[in-house]
Image: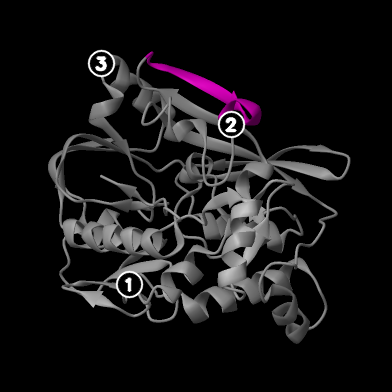
């Protein structure tokens, strides 16, 4: 374990924002982490837990403790009928785990290929893409409770997974440092190809398989999403808004090309990227912050932007979309 003071977080956030934290705690072993949290009275409001840094926008320095868990490992811990159970360290790069699962013929996460970040952040955000959410595959989350100074195992039901959401973003925000996540993957996967252009791209690649699905989604994402090393960003900045079906129908009367995604009998999700693009924001730049020219959901640091600049751009987009469509966008990225 390493504890560093006045530590720069520039390399630990994909927006490439120059900010610092009071203390930075990098930990690879649960025992050391437990020893540390038992030595201090920590308040979750003074704590931040970082993984790949792909879901944060810093607008100022963080006057508290940043935990950076780096637990590694990916091992099969059990099998049950058609399923296999895999325990993965929170510091493992998410896409490396997806690649491992696909290589071993295990389904359940292939549609989440190329989603940035570490495994430890996936249950917090309940990451999702192309018709699949990680919460569907999570069995349990192991973590260290910084308030009680003890190790806990939290089952999937208790995590309260919903669209890009979990209990870790609300009542338990910054209280638990995730150390390991156990996933249930399928040895006989059911392919999901209905979202966007996934089906057509897979067919172009040949036989439908986990590998071709991963290849297709990787190609689609690379074609429209900027590389954070070239153009700093945090992926999709906004969630697709959940609205009542009747309201969506009224919008479709005015905007027939508006994409909607069914949720249940009474609700649908609207395509936030379409709303932003139709409102005229795609490719627009204000100061050093901009909207990506190929994907309106992605806000980018065009060079030297501050977090405040990017947050200002996000707020202007939200106001613009609300005035035109009556829909209030919610950020998927955590603004600190």
Q: Quadrant of the C terminus?
A: top left
Q: CA distance from mark 3 to mark 1?
A: 38 Å
Mark 2 element type:
loop
Q: Residue at x 81, y 43 (%)?
A: 83
Left or right, 300 with respect to 278, comes to left
Per the image, the residue denoted by label 2 is 160
Mark 3 element type:
helix
Left or right, 137 with respect to 26, comes to right
Sequence-first tag of 2 and 3: 3
Q: Quadrant of residue 306?
A: bottom left
Which residue appears farthest toward the left when viewing the image?
6
Which residue appears farthest toward the right when viewing the image?
81
Mark 1 element type:
loop
Closest to the observer, 70 or 173: 173
Q: Quadrant of the N terminus?
A: top left
Stretch in magenta: 148-160
Q: Residue at x 42, y 53 (%)?
A: 328
Per the image, the residue denoted by label 3 is 39
Per the image, the residue denoted by label 1 is 229
């Amino acid at each position: 374990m390493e504890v560093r003071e006045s530590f720069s977080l520039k390399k630990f956030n994909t927006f490439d924002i120059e900010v610092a934290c009071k203390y930075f705690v990098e930990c690879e072993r649960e025992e050391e982490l437990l020893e540390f949290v038992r030595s201090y009275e920590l308040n979750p409001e003074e704590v931040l837990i970082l993984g790949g840094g792909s879901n944060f926008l810093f607008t100022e320095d963080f006057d508290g403790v940043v935990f950076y868990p780096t637990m590694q490992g990916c091992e099969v811990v059990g099998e049950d009928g058609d399923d296999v159970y895999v325990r993965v360290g929170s510091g493992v790069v998410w896409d490396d785990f997806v690649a491992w699962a696909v290589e071993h013929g295990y389904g359940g996460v292939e549609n989440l290929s190329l989603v940035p970040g570490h495994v430890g952040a996936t249950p917090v955000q309940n990451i999702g893409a192309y018709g699949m959410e990680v919460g569907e595959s999570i069995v349990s989350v192991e973590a260290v409770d910084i308030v009680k100074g003890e190790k806990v195992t939290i089952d999937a039901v208790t995590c309260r997974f919903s669209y890009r959401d979990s209990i870790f973003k609300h009542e338990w925000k910054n209280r638990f440092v995730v150390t390991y996540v156990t996933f249930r993957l399928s040895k006989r996967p059911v392919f999901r190809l209905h979202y966007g252009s996934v089906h057509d791209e897979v067919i172009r690649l040949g036989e439908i398989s986990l590998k071709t699905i991963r290849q297709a989604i990787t190609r689609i994402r690379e074609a429209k999403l900027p590389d954070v090393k070239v153009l700093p960003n945090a992926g999709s900045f906004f969630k697709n808004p959940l609205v009542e079906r009747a309201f969506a129908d009224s919008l479709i009367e005015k905007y027939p090309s508006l994409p909607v995604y069914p949720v249940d009998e009474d609700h649908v999700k609207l395509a936030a990227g379409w709303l932003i693009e139709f409102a005229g924001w795609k490719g627009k730049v204000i100061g050093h912050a901009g909207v990506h020219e190929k994907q309106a959901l992605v806000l980018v640091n065009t060079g030297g932007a501050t977090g405040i600049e990017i947050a200002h751009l996000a707020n202007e987009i939200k106001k613009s979309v609300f005035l035109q469509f009556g829909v209030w966008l919610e950020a998927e990225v955590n603004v600190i």
